[in-house]
Image (cartoon, rainbow, N blue to C red):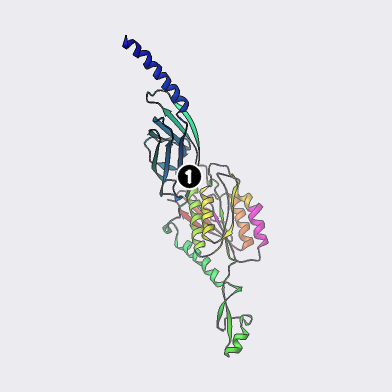
């Protein structure tokens, strides 16, 4: 008789437990994800998961599911790549009023901007079999900045060209900045003589000025496909080259401006960054380069030359302190023509062209200085 009574009681308790669990399991349950510091591609950071169950009902089995871009490698046993996303599943068992913090190592395999906007929580009771779902909003992101190219990728002529640009900066003096007084030489102009200091000392003295601060590097990044079949990492090399040039010139206190037909993954706008030479400016360029989405369609760079770059160059045609540097693996006729026109207006243009050994090198004629960058 007791056994007969026990069976329905067990079924009633089973039903009550499952019903109560299904209605209340997600109450006061939080899941917060946060990335560590931003990194350069090839480096490591971490992803911290904080799961908190603030109620007396325990959750015997909890799955935390979320997605990241496939350029990130999250060390977890249940990663499944789906198209351009990677599904991550982490498993927890929560007691009543328990908080669990777990840190997952993350490897920045590829440049990019990575967001986690939501997590899917799947709960199971102690009996199992029935899945219960809920979502939790997230707001965490990670920048993986492009790395700089090693110096052995550049030949001697390229390194000399960079040195010439820096040297030219220090050969031009800014008449509006005064640094001191020195003795007169036959190379100085009469207008540079400081007559008051000359009268006081009895010898000719001239004003000493700081180097000009008006010199500017305009970096032009073209992310158009160079051919029908090509190594996709070739465009990434162009982005890394822009990062390398930015770091180099800003380290020399030379202002850098960036124009690109690459589109921002957040705004879908083309990249436009005004001139600057501070560490913050370098960081801004690194962020924008990280956010270039190469899956978005881009318009021909020749159009940007005609609409923006060439008209601007015409307004500054009488200035000799602007250096235009085009980074493009694409060598179509329209780009060569537009680059040639800009070179004629400005007096010169430097074209940096990442190419694989099998790709044809089309050296433009005229005032374009062409440099092939080895793609490994």
Relative to 290, 130 lies left or right: left
Which span of residues is magenta-colored?
305-328
* Extreme residue toward the top, this view: 1
The residue positioned 60% from the left and 87% from the top of the image is: 198
Q: Position of residue 111 (x, y in %)?
A: 47, 47
Classify 107 as above or below 258: above
Q: Position of residue 12 (x, y in %)?
A: 40, 16
The residue positioned 55% from the left and 72% from the top of the image is: 171
- Could you say which is closer to the camera, residue 255 or residue 151? 255
Q: Position of residue 291 (x, y in %)?
A: 53, 47
What is the quadrant of the N terminus in the image?
A: top left
Classify 207 as above or below 113: below
The residue positioned 41% from the left and 58% from the top of the image is: 152
Say whether residue 307 is magenta. Answer: yes
Determine which quarter of the picture holds residue 173. Answer: bottom right
Say whether residue 180 is magenta. Answer: no
Q: Position of residue 275 (x, y in %)?
A: 59, 59
Q: How many marks?
A: 1
- Residue placed under numbered mark 1 in the picture: 232
């Amino acid at each position: 008789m007791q056994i007969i009574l026990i069976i329905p009681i067990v079924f009633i308790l089973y039903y009550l437990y499952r019903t109560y669990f299904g209605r209340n399991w997600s109450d006061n349950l939080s899941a917060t994800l946060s990335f560590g510091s931003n990194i350069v591609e090839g480096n490591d950071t971490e992803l911290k998961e904080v799961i908190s169950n603030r109620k007396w009902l325990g959750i015997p089995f909890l799955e935390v599911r979320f997605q990241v871009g496939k350029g990130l490698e999250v060390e977890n046993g249940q990663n499944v790549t789906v198209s351009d996303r990677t599904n991550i599943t982490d498993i927890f068992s929560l007691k009543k009023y328990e908080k669990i913090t777990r840190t997952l190592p993350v490897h920045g395999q590829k440049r990019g901007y990575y967001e986690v906007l939501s997590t899917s929580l799947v709960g199971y009771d102690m009996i199992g079999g029935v899945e219960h779902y809920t979502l939790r909003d997230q707001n965490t992101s990670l920048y993986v900045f492009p790395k700089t190219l090693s110096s052995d990728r550049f030949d001697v002529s390229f390194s000399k060209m960079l040195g010439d640009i820096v040297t030219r900066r220090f050969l031009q003096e800014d008449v509006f900045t005064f640094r001191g007084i020195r003795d007169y030489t036959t190379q100085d102009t009469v207008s540079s003589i400081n007559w008051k200091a000359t009268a006081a000392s009895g010898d000719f003295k001239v004003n000493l000025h700081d180097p000009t601060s008006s010199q500017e590097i305009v970096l032009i990044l073209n992310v158009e496909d160079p051919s029908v079949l090509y190594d996709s990492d070739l465009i990434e090399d162009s982005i890394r080259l822009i990062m390398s040039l930015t770091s180099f010139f800003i380290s020399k206190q030379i202002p850098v401006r960036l124009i690109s037909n690459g589109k921002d993954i957040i705004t879908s706008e083309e990249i436009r960054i005004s001139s600057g030479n501070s560490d913050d400016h370098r960081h801004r360029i690194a962020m924008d380069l990280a956010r270039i989405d190469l899956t978005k369609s881009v318009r021909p760079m020749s159009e940007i030359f005609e609409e923006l770059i060439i008209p601007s160059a015409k307004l500054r045609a009488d200035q000799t302190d602007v250096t235009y540097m085009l980074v493009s693996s694409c060598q179509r006729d329209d780009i060569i023509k537009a680059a040639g026109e800009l070179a004629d207006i400005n007096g010169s243009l430097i074209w940096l062209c990442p190419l694989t050994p099998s790709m044809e090198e089309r050296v433009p004629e005229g005032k374009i200085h062409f440099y092939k960058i080895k793609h490994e």
